[in-house]
Amino acid sequence: MFQPLLASATRAVDKLRDIGEPLPEDLTSQLAKLADDAQSDAVKAAKIEELLRPHVLVEAQIDERGLTASTPGAAVPRLVQHGWRSFLVRIENPHQLLGDLVAPSNHVLGNVDFHSHSARIAMPDTLTVVPRIASSWLQVKLAGPRDVSGLDVEYKVISLYSRDGGHKSGELTLVLAVQEEFASITRSPVRKAFQRMGFESRQYGARFEFDCLPAHDVRLDVREPDGSSSVAALTIRDSQRRAYPSKAMRLAPDMFFHDHVYRATGEVITLPAGQYEISARRGPEYREVRLEVDLTAGTDAVEIPLDRWADPAARGYYSGDPHIHAGGCSHYNVPSEGVTPETMIRHVRGEGLWMGSVLTWGPCYYHQKQFFSGSSISPRAELEYPAMQQAQGMTWDPQDTDRDGQSLLRYDLEVSGFPSSHSGHVILLGLTDQDYPGTKIIEDWPSWNLPVMRWGHAQNALVGYAHCGLGLSVDTNELPNYVVPKFQSIGSNEIIVDVPLGSADFQCGAEFDPASELNIWYHLLNVGYRTLMLGETDYPCIYDDGPGVGRTYVRLPEPPQGPQALESWLGGLKDGASYFGDGRSHVYDFAVDGAVTRELAVDEAGPVKVTATVAAWLPEEPPAAPAAGRPVYSAPVGWHLERARIGRSRNVLVEVLVNGVPAGTQELLADGNEQALEFEVGLERSSWVALRILRSVHTQPIFVEIGGRPIRASRRSAQWLHDSVDALWEAKSGFIRETEQAAAREAYDAAQATYLVRRDECEVD
């Protein structure tokens, strides 16, 4: 039928135009005129086929069983290295089957399901991994709708990306996932279709001898505002918003789950000629810079000036992320079990972090634990596994920068994927020994957390809990609130037992909604405990974006450096001023009555002066509304200064807290400038005082003891903690080994007894 064929052809031609590869104008003009042509439908249909034939790369014939045979079309198979070329596909479907067409490739690096938001690379053949990488040079995907509509003949658009230049042999296969079959497939229509075919797809593939035009290396001149060199996160896109290098073709240090890559001043990226947008940033202390670049064959370098709006280190505050991973979650397990320190330091430097705690955990545990040394390190950002990199064609030389020494790694441990994980995922920072006594494998470890916490403390480590808000949400956003959660997930569950027994120092958050994260913390502070709160990322598990999405800033007299850098940073965290959040707002020199300290003693109740220098940066206008069904930010309910914006203004609300309750507020213009704020609040009894911009930044408290009396600010907080221990036991005791149940019950009882004593010491409800 002529009209459906014309509509299909027009859609395909329009798609080629939209992605920047239009067919000749005379062809499109002739195609448009056919609609009003007086000739017969058969003649006009033949004319469509004649016009499009020179641009068809693949002819696909679908038989009555839904099996697809692909043969080469008339288009010249010419590709471009590190770039995309698009062609037409002609589909002949005489049995008018319905389904979705997919284009797997035998040459792509692993199997990536582009239909899924949780795509992961899987390359099962680890024995021949280097040859597999070398042969994985071609990426294939259909551009536009994939549905086969049941027409006798229709046209689609196929796009090909070549990693390599020169002459390459390759095969293209098209597979139909028929409609009734596709409806039952949630992740991989390719796999199900292959099972239906019953034999390997290459028996139905079209063989090609491709001519891949070479691209060239472009040097990236990344510069700090003072002219110094550094590492930055660079996102390179073409007019179709496709990221370069192709995400499916990446190997560490370029990760397939990032849009960006991390490059240092003087390093290169291989690109074909064309127009690109390059976005550059180096963590939230920098405004994103966007450059429109027209690369020609003669372009050998691009200048990339970074735009820094805040420099906490110049004020004596040094950033760290206490929770990042080199294996597991989004990291691939093949061709290697996660990535090496050389890749992790590149990511940490690219986000402008001073400290990155790389936590070995269940996935890849036995491989990754080799990198533990008990010392902070700042390795050169080499390309890991040279044979793999060479096979991948990554031959550029890593470059040192002026800022490299400002970023360090410390390998430590997260007790996740261990027998006690149900009680909350424990983070152990500053270990000297990573093997629990008497254990050989993960399964030998304790089935509840207190023994692990005490073992960490015996090494002078700082011990606490990860992603504190998981499973602790209740039906209110009030802070503090008195609803006992169900403890059904892996938040800071057992912290309510460990803290009163002197065996937990902190919890980590700045990832989820504040009520779920801060409520336990506020209650512990209200009965006098000095528990710390840290910002973390859990990269790349909760956040894929990069290290430092959540971060902690610690005030130190000098930068953390050398093998004991983490110990210096942790020492400042325990004894000095710090704040945590998303890095888009900062609180410097937070003080009560002029004292920048953790502890303050005063003689009598009365007013105190709370001061700080605060800076925050938001764009002048709120972001445009997201497309239907898509969030503005990557976290569903996470921390981001944009969520603190007041209406459509550029202002955010700064709150001073006394015992978790706002005692004063001021609006702050988030234009990046430092502003001195001052509050006067009355203290009737010993209390803790803090500043926050909810969903962006929170200081550690200053503990003000009046007349030598300890902080006992809320009977209701003590009772809530006591009752929560009961709920925790109900939820978690069944996961504790029978041989450990008695000791655990004794510890739970001791924690509850301590809360009852403190409840009776409280002065107010």
Image (cartoon, helix red, strand yellow):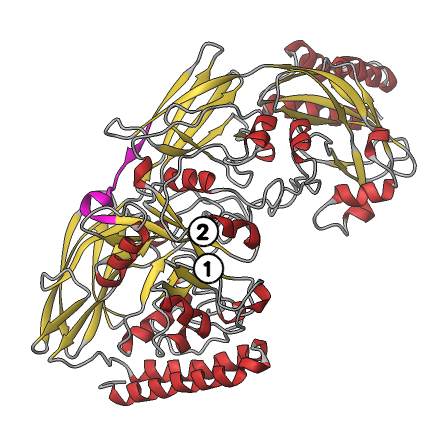
**Residue 178 visible from this viewpoint:** no
Residue at disc 1, secondary structure: loop
Q: Amino acid at mark 1?
A: Gln
Residue at horizontal 71 percent and vertical 51 percent from the top: 186
**Left or right: 459 as drawn, with respect to 335:** left
Location of mark 1 (residue): 434
State the residue in front, 50 or 138: 138
Picture coordinates of residue 63, whole percent (x, y): 90, 33
**Left or right: 448 as drawn, with respect to 303:** right
Is 131 placed above or below 644 here? above
**Magenta stretch: residue 311 in it?**
yes
State the residue in front, 67 or 449: 449
State the residue in front, 226 or 11: 226
Is 285 placed above or below 271 here? below
Q: Quadrant of the C terminus?
A: bottom left
Q: Amino acid at mark 2?
A: Phe
Q: Name which of mark 1 and mark 2 comes first in the sequence.
A: 2
Magenta part of the chain: 305-317
Location of mark 2 (residue): 372
Picture coordinates of residue 291, whole percent (x, y): 39, 25
Q: Quadrant of the N terminus?
A: top right
How busy is the neighbourhood of tag 1: few (under 14 within 10 Å), some, or many (20 plus)?
Answer: some
